[in-house]
Amino acid sequence: MTINHHPSDATLAAYASGALDQARGLVVATHLSLCAQCRDAVHGFEQVGGAMLGDAEPVAMSSGALQRAMAALGPLDVVQPVPADTNSAYEFPEPLSRYALGPWRWIGRGVQWRAVDVASDDGVRVFMLKAKPGVKLPRHRHTGTEWTCVFEGAFSHHLGRYGAGDFDEADETVEHDPAVDNEFGCVCLVALQGHIELQGFFGRLLQPLIRI
């Protein structure tokens, strides 16, 4: 597997420091499960963070700090493993095994959508997309960020081709019209903040039908 597109250094550093919300963190973790280069980068950021903590002056904890930290973690049994019959080794990287998945639903010609039950404090929704070979998605932009990790197959747009393991990090400045690989189709995990806005006359006609 050759991986050509990776999260930015800022994103990897935020992941290493625990600054990402759980939703976007899951998409980054999925990429890390497939990419040794980014795992090494995260390890390097963790070492830098550890060294900085080691050099910092100790500060006494405030009263009740431990209790507040444990309360923020929530119940330890919230995340349930996905049943084995819905989680095949080739289709789902390991980080997804900790989250409940909804059923596949058709959202357009040749495109299916599947919810991933992940909590987010930043209005981020996580879902899987599966598209048949040769599908061309309408040109669109986003009102927030869209982070995508490909599991299998590939898609392409004006910024390049994204195959298995690749990470596409887009924001509201990006407008694109992805085309799915003609031979293998595409399966990917997406963390979407905000909404998709279809462009052009026909896009605006279809907009009421888009629920992601």
Image (cartoon, rainbow, N blue to C red):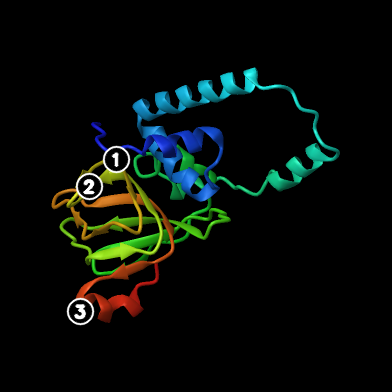
Who's the residue at 22% across and 67% down the image?
A: 138
> Disc 3 or 2, which lies upstream in sequence?
2
Secondary structure at numbered mark 3 = helix
Say which of 97 and 21 sits in front: 21
Toward which corner of the image does residue 11 lie, by quadrant? Answer: top left
Say which of 106 and 45 sits in front: 45
According to the picture, the residue beneath numbered tag 1 turns out to be 166
Toward which corner of the image does residue 17 lie, by quadrant? Answer: top right
Cα–Cα span, label 3 and label 2: 27 Å
Q: Which residue lies furthest to the right in this view?
A: 63
> In the image, what residue type sits under mark 3?
Phe
Is residue 82 visible from the viewing direction of this image?
no
Q: Do the residues labelled 1 and 2 touch (CB within 8 Å)?
A: yes
**At which x and y percent is residue 101?**
48, 55
Toward which corner of the image does residue 28 lie, by quadrant? Answer: top left
Disc sitting over residue 201 in the figure: 3
According to the picture, the residue beneath numbered tag 2 turns out to be 154
**At which x and y percent is residue 180?**
20, 54
